Amino acid sequence: MMVQFLFIGTTELLLIGGIALLLFGGKKLPEMMRGLGQGVKEFKKGVNDVEASVNDADDDGRRKDGGTADAKKDDNKEEHGAQGRQ
Protein backbone atom coordinates (compact mmCIF):
# COMPACT_ATOMS: atom_id res chain seq x y z
CA MET A 1 0.00 0.00 0.00
CA MET A 2 1.44 3.34 -1.02
CA VAL A 3 0.96 6.24 1.35
CA GLN A 4 -0.15 9.40 -0.40
CA PHE A 5 1.91 12.36 0.70
CA LEU A 6 -0.31 15.39 0.22
CA PHE A 7 -1.74 13.70 -2.89
CA ILE A 8 1.55 14.12 -4.77
CA GLY A 9 2.23 11.31 -7.23
CA THR A 10 5.50 9.80 -8.40
CA THR A 11 5.64 12.00 -11.49
CA GLU A 12 5.24 15.16 -9.45
CA LEU A 13 7.94 14.07 -6.99
CA LEU A 14 10.36 13.36 -9.85
CA LEU A 15 9.60 16.75 -11.39
CA ILE A 16 10.18 18.53 -8.07
CA GLY A 17 13.41 16.56 -7.56
CA GLY A 18 14.61 17.44 -11.05
CA ILE A 19 13.91 21.14 -10.56
CA ALA A 20 15.69 21.09 -7.19
CA LEU A 21 18.67 19.35 -8.80
CA LEU A 22 18.83 22.01 -11.53
CA LEU A 23 18.52 24.88 -9.05
CA PHE A 24 20.95 23.71 -6.38
CA GLY A 25 23.27 21.32 -8.20
CA GLY A 26 24.40 17.80 -7.40
CA LYS A 27 26.81 18.76 -4.63
CA LYS A 28 24.62 21.14 -2.66
CA LEU A 29 21.39 19.08 -2.73
CA PRO A 30 22.60 16.19 -0.50
CA GLU A 31 23.93 18.69 2.04
CA MET A 32 20.58 20.49 2.09
CA MET A 33 18.63 17.24 2.54
CA ARG A 34 20.99 16.15 5.32
CA GLY A 35 20.44 19.48 7.08
CA LEU A 36 16.68 19.13 6.64
CA GLY A 37 16.79 15.64 8.13
CA GLN A 38 18.79 16.84 11.12
CA GLY A 39 16.36 19.70 11.63
CA VAL A 40 13.39 17.33 11.65
CA LYS A 41 15.23 15.05 14.07
CA GLU A 42 15.93 17.94 16.47
CA PHE A 43 12.32 19.13 16.21
CA LYS A 44 10.98 15.68 17.11
CA LYS A 45 13.44 15.46 20.01
CA GLY A 46 12.25 18.84 21.31
CA VAL A 47 8.60 17.79 21.05
CA ASN A 48 9.34 14.57 22.95
CA ASP A 49 11.21 16.51 25.65
CA VAL A 50 8.29 18.89 26.12
CA GLU A 51 5.80 16.02 26.29
CA ALA A 52 7.97 14.24 28.86
CA SER A 53 8.27 17.35 31.03
CA VAL A 54 4.50 17.94 30.89
CA ASN A 55 3.85 14.33 31.87
CA ASP A 56 6.37 14.57 34.72
CA ALA A 57 4.80 17.79 35.99
CA ASP A 58 1.35 16.18 35.84
CA ASP A 59 2.61 13.13 37.76
CA ASP A 60 4.29 15.37 40.37
CA GLY A 61 1.07 17.34 40.83
CA ARG A 62 -0.88 14.16 41.46
CA ARG A 63 1.68 12.94 43.99
CA LYS A 64 1.73 16.24 45.89
CA ASP A 65 -2.02 16.41 46.42
CA GLY A 66 -2.15 12.74 47.31
CA GLY A 67 -4.74 12.05 44.67
CA THR A 68 -7.29 14.34 46.36
CA ALA A 69 -7.93 16.26 43.14
CA ASP A 70 -9.01 13.07 41.40
CA ALA A 71 -11.14 12.07 44.38
CA LYS A 72 -12.84 15.49 44.37
CA LYS A 73 -13.63 15.13 40.67
CA ASP A 74 -15.18 11.71 41.32
CA ASP A 75 -17.24 13.10 44.23
CA ASN A 76 -18.51 15.95 42.05
CA LYS A 77 -19.51 13.52 39.30
CA GLU A 78 -21.42 11.37 41.80
CA GLU A 79 -23.20 14.39 43.32
CA HIS A 80 -24.23 15.79 39.95
CA GLY A 81 -25.28 12.38 38.74
CA ALA A 82 -27.43 11.78 41.84
CA GLN A 83 -29.07 15.20 41.51
CA GLY A 84 -29.95 14.56 37.90
CA ARG A 85 -31.65 11.26 38.71
CA GLN A 86 -34.03 12.73 41.31
Image: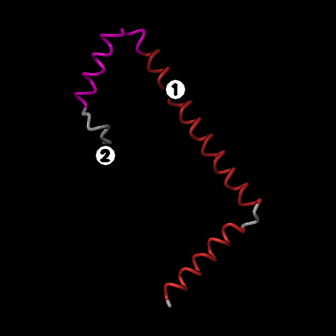
The prevailing secondary structure element of the residues shown in magenta is: helix
Q: Earlier in the sequence, mark 1 or mark 2?
A: 2
Q: Position of residue 23 (x, y in %)?
A: 32, 10
**How many numbered callouts?**
2
Per the model, the C-alpha gap separating discs 1 and 2 is: 28 Å
From this view, report whether residue 17 is shown above or below residue 73.
above
Q: Amino acid at mark 2?
A: Met
From this view, report whether residue 57 is shown above or below residue 63.
above
Disc 1: CA contacts within 10 A as few (<14), some (14-19) or many (>=20): few
Residue at 30% in and 42% down: 2
Q: Report which quarter residue 70 is drawn in.
A: bottom right
Q: Is residue 48 magenta?
A: no
User: Where does label 2 land, which residue?
Assistant: 1
Q: Is residue 15 left or right of residue 30?
A: left
Q: Report which quarter residue 74 is drawn in.
A: bottom right
What mark, if any, has residue 55 been given in the picture? Answer: none
Q: Is residue 33 left or right of residue 44?
A: left
Q: Position of residue 9 (x, y in %)?
A: 24, 33
Disc 2: CA contacts within 10 A as few (<14), some (14-19) or many (>=20): few
Q: Position of residue 5 (x, y in %)?
A: 32, 37
In-front residue for pair 26/74: 74
Residues rendered magenta in the picture: 10-29
Q: Is residue 81 left or right of residue 70?
A: left
Q: Is residue 55 left or right of residue 86?
A: right
User: Where does label 1 land, which residue?
Assistant: 39
In-front residue for pair 69/41: 69
For mark 2, give the secondary structure.
Answer: loop
Q: Amino acid at mark 1?
A: Gly
